[in-house]
Image: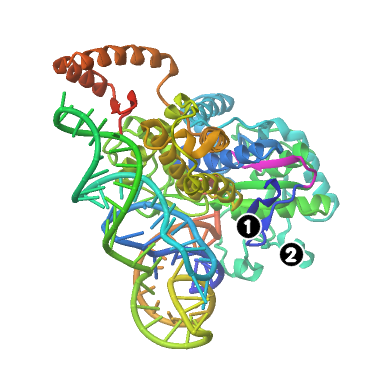
Amino acid sequence: MINDLKIHNSLTRKKELFKPINPPFVGLYVCGPTVYSDVHMGNVRTFMSFDVVNRYLKHLGYKVRYVRNITDVGHLVNDADDGEDKIGKKAKLENLEPMEIVQRYANGFHQVMDMFNTLPPDIEPSATGHIVEQIEITKKLLENGWAYEKNGSVYFNVEKYNKSHEYGILSGRKIEDLQSNTRALDGQDDKESPLDFALWKKASDEHIMRWPSPWGAGFPGWHLECTVMSTKYLGETFDIHGGGLDLKFPHHECEIAQSVGATGKSPVNYWIHTNMLTVNGQKMSKSLGNSFLPTELVTGNHAMLDQGYSPMSVRFFMLQTHYSSTLDFSNEALKAAQKGYRKLANGLKTVKKLNFAQDEGSKNEQVINEIKQACDNCYRSMNDDFNTAKTIAQLFELLKKINSLHAGQLKYSEIGKEVFTKLVNTYQSFMVDVLGLKEETPAEVHPIIEALLDVYKKAKAEKNYAQVDEIRAVLKSNKLLIKDMKTGVDWAYEE
RNA sequence: GGUCACGUGGCCGAGUGGCUAGGCAGUGGUCUGCAAAACCAUUUACAGCGGUUCGAAUCCGCUCGUGACCUCCA
């Protein structure tokens, strides 16, 4: 099963069998955020998608080194020579040190990632921590003849590179098309061609973020950091590189050119690109002003939101769609997801209470096969390019069996201990370990709820229906409900 | 304008040649002090037109519509 993982490779545009370079080790690099403002839900979607990639690879037994960078310099507001650094601009605006800006939004980013239950990367390098390496690779590219210096800046010569290599190999672009379509931006006089991109840029006098270099005071170009940091921690060629679809061109295309130019090797075996989150059919982005902040979504404090949605509901909502499809944000869809998630979360709670017992049932081959199939399908679905939507469908099938056992509609003896164990283990591991969906009510309150249930049971036995209804009401006001079953009484998260 | 995607039932969304996706909503039933939950059953599909094929939501062509990238973007 472990060898059956297939990944849609953006580079070849095909689904390919995943073969790590050096198993069981896997190198995974994902382009992280530029920390100049709060991350929005679109950003979150990408990192959540790769969180599942990371989790599933680990679940399969791979030793993953997950590297996700923090961009804290070099990302310019535009491509002009006087283009401001995003972080430097914000620092000036708020009268703070650039590193204060970086720290503030990096902290916020980590809080958000934690809220959505994404595992931290194994290495989280920052661009400013790798200035020396970026200068070194720039020197190398100059030595190798792929770059040129002009007025204290260094640019990559795309046209020259394209003569012997394929510049548009990842994004499917032809350099001729790019040339005819490139807009003439102001202030690009230093470049020999508008297609060329900066490796190192000269810092103007008012530019705050600056480092000494062989070409004078300046700062690294945006694309360079990922090349340097992925190479440093994962090697000149590594397994998987991911990022949002909008980074495919030019960012990832430039990364390939830089690596090939510096080492002669193609840097990445499998490229994965995640699709965009949309609002009313349009890409969520800060510039369009249609973005939601995670806190707004959770509290419901936004003009377009009817109510708040819990982090796990949102996580479930996003995983119901394949990462390569656009996902549209709407109240209706989120409400449906909230209910679906609660149902699955209740299953997580229920499954812990199940204890196998030899009861009066006899083996039911049909049910046994249904359970086995659904369990296997969890792996098949994830192996099919991390198809979380299909996996979730399987979990709902397993959930039905779990609930049937709990309510006594299905007998333990009908499925046998082995299949029961498989059912429980598969449900838990795919929910918690692979998809990262956890219960949201703190475990500490569970005993209190159970104590209240004891009172409820007693009142019921005494046919004290006034008190029975009262207890129901109390729990309901706390978003919990009581389940009266033939086999006993239990509680669940309200749906 | 160039390049590339996408268009599935009331809603959200899997599915890439024959086999029930799934969730939400709806309907009927079992259960129940009444309910709820749970389980069982069930209704509504593949943008349009043409082609390939024994057979297409799935492949090909055209039309219409939507979006992304081409400039910063996850």
Amino acid at pointer 2? Asn
Q: Is residue A441 visible?
A: yes
The residue that mark 2 highlights is A162
Reading the image, the residue beneath label 1 is: A10
Q: Is residue A106 left or right of residue A64?
A: left
Callout 1: SS: loop
Identity, as a three-letter code, of the amino acid under mark 1: Ser
Is residue A103 inside the magenta stretch? no
Looking at the picture, how far across and down is residue A135, in whole percent? 77, 39
Badge 2 local density, few (<14 within 10 Å), some, or many (20+)?
Answer: some
Q: Quadrant of residue A361?
A: top left
Percent coordinates x, y for residue A478 in the rendering: 28, 21
Check the image and report above or below for A321 versus A357. Answer: below
The range drawn in magenta is: A21-32
Relative to A478, A192 lies left or right: right
Q: Are marks 2 and 1 on the same chain?
A: yes
Inspect the magenta stretch and tell me whether residue A31 lies in it. yes
With respect to residue A477, does A133 lie above or below? Answer: below
